[in-house]
Image: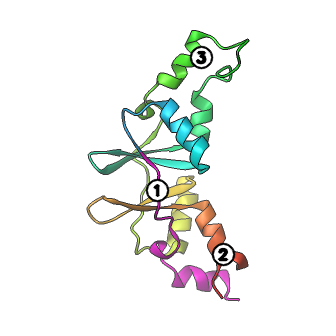
Amino acid sequence: MPAAADIQSAACVRDVMTARVHTLELDDSVYQAARLFERERFHHVVILARGKVFGVISDRDILKSISPFVGNPVLERAQDLATLRKRVHQIMTRKPVTVNPAVSIGEAARTMLAQKVSCLPVVDDHGALLGILTVRDLVAQLSPAGQEE
């Protein structure tokens, strides 16, 4: 098995990124985002505006923004349900750090660590979304099960 340094120098972001990216628009509701996370079982959604990456929301952002009483018939109040009507632009991380698909995965990993982020939207030179690179993608690349033999 090649050393981690060999894998990092040989592979580019395009080789390990997830091409299927879940996206929402700025004015979609937190409820829509929560349902998407629940249905698709992933950890990040990219927010688009006019076809360009404008923000990112994680499943943790959703948990922090929704009242803990939502769905509890005894404790739920009107103001708790109002948390679901917020718009995703109200809770997203704006101007997310992005990466080009030609960047090495080692450099992308260093960027994720330096910026303290768990994903990087992958964009082309014009800012169009091509995919997403997550910590899970990097771990899969480094683990024996994630590598082709």
Task: Tell which of 130 and 126 is nearer to you.
Answer: 130
Badge number at residue 80: 3
82 with respect to 25 (left or right): right
Residue corresponding to mark 2: 146
> In terms of sequence position, does the residue under pointer 3 or pointer 2 come before the other?
3
Label 3: few (<14), some or many (≥20) within 10 Å? some
> In terms of sequence position, does the residue under pointer 3 or pointer 1 come before the other?
1
Separation of marks 3 and 2 at Cα, in angstroms: 42 Å
Which amino acid type is marked by label 1? Val
Residue 21: image location, x then y, percent: 46, 56
Helix, strand, or loop for circle 3? helix
Which amino acid type is marked by label 3? Asp
| CB under 8 Å between discs 3 and 2 | no
Residue 42: image location, x then y, percent: 59, 51
Separation of marks 3 and 1 at Cα, in angstroms: 29 Å
Residue 31: image location, x then y, percent: 51, 30
- The image shows residue 24, relative to residue 28, as above or below, that is below
Residue 13 in the magenta stretch? The answer is: yes
Helix, strand, or loop for circle 2? helix
User: What residue do we see at 53% from left, 83% from top?
Assistant: 9
- The image shows residue 114, relative to residue 107, as above or below, that is above
Badge number at residue 83: none
> In terms of sequence position, does the residue under pointer 2 or pointer 1 come before the other?
1
Separation of marks 2 and 1 at Cα, in angstroms: 20 Å
Which amino acid type is marked by label 2? Gly
Q: How is the image coloured?
A: rainbow
**Which residues fall within the magenta stretch?**
1-23
User: What residue do we see at 48% from left, 77% from top?
Assistant: 12
Residue corresponding to mark 1: 21
Quadrant the C terminus occupies: bottom right
Image quadrant in which you'd find residue 146: bottom right
Quadrant the N terminus occupies: bottom right
